[in-house]
Image (spheres, rainbow, N blue to C red):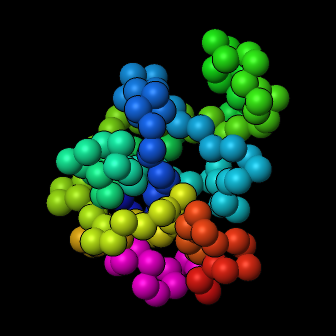
Amino acid sequence: MLIYPDDRVLVAVMNNLDDWRRVQDEGWYRIPVKHAPEPVPHIDWLAFYQTKTFREDRWAVHFYARVLGHELLTRQDLMPAEPNHPRAKAWYYKLSLGPLHHKLPPIISEKRRRITFIFTTGDRFEAAAEINDLLNDESPAGYPFVTLKETKEDFVE
C-alpha cells in the first residue's frame, strides 16, 4: 500500500494484548476523545508503537494500517462485556482500519520512550529508522508529538 508524502500518520501506543487482538481480529482501534490529539480522527494512517508487553518486538513500530473511517462511541458501546468499567460512559473514537502492513525495517526506539502519540507525515514515516527521526524537527505539516510526561504546553513547535 502506497503512503503519499503528505499523508497524515499517527503513531499510537500499543501497550496491551487485548487492544492488539482487536486491531488484528476486528480491524479497529480506540482513542479516548478526552485525550485525542487535535487532528484525530482525520488521519490517513495509524501506526503502532509497541511497548514492553510485546517482548522481542518492544519499543518499535512494526505495523501500520490505513484508517478507513471513524465513529464516535462510548466505551460501553465498544466493549459491552465491561458495562461497569469506570470509563464506561466516556466517549471514544473508533478508528476502522484496513489490513495491517509490516514496517520493514521497523522504526525502533533506542531509548525506551513513553510515547502516547506522534504525528508525522507519510514521507517522514517511510524514511524513519529510529523514533527520533519522527521527532527531531517540526514536520512539514506542523504536527506536534505527545509523550506521557508532556502536556499541550510542552509540544514541540
The answer to which of 28 and 108 lies nearer the viewer is 108
Q: Judge left or right: residue 25 versus residue 104.
A: right
Q: Residue at x 26, y 45 (%)?
A: 55
Does the stretch in magenta take in 144? no
The spot of residue 71 in percent (x, y) is 68, 34
The answer to which of 27 and 132 lies nearer the viewer is 132
Can residue 70 be spotted in the picture? no
Q: Where on the picture, by quarter, is residue 109?
A: bottom left
Q: Which residues are magenta?
A: 132-142
For the C terminus, the quadrant is: bottom right
Provide the major secondary structure of the magenta segment.
loop
Q: Residue at x 36, y 42 (%)?
A: 53
Q: Where on the picture, by quarter, is residue 72?
A: top right
Above/below status of 148 relative to 21: below
Q: Residue at x 73, y 79 (%)?
A: 153
The spot of residue 41 in percent (x, y) is 65, 49
Can residue 3 be spotted in the picture? yes
**Residue ranking furthest to the top:** 81
Above/below status of 12 relative to 137: above
Q: Judge left or right: residue 151 versus residue 2.
A: right
Q: Where on the picture, by quarter, is residue 95?
A: top right
What count of labels does the image hold? 0
Does the stretch in magenta take in 140? yes
The spot of residue 37 in percent (x, y) is 66, 60
Q: Judge left or right: residue 87 versus residue 115.
A: right
Q: Residue at x 59, y 38 (%)?
A: 30
The spot of residue 48 in percent (x, y) is 40, 50
**Residue ranking furthest to the left:** 105
Above/below status of 39 relative to 77: below
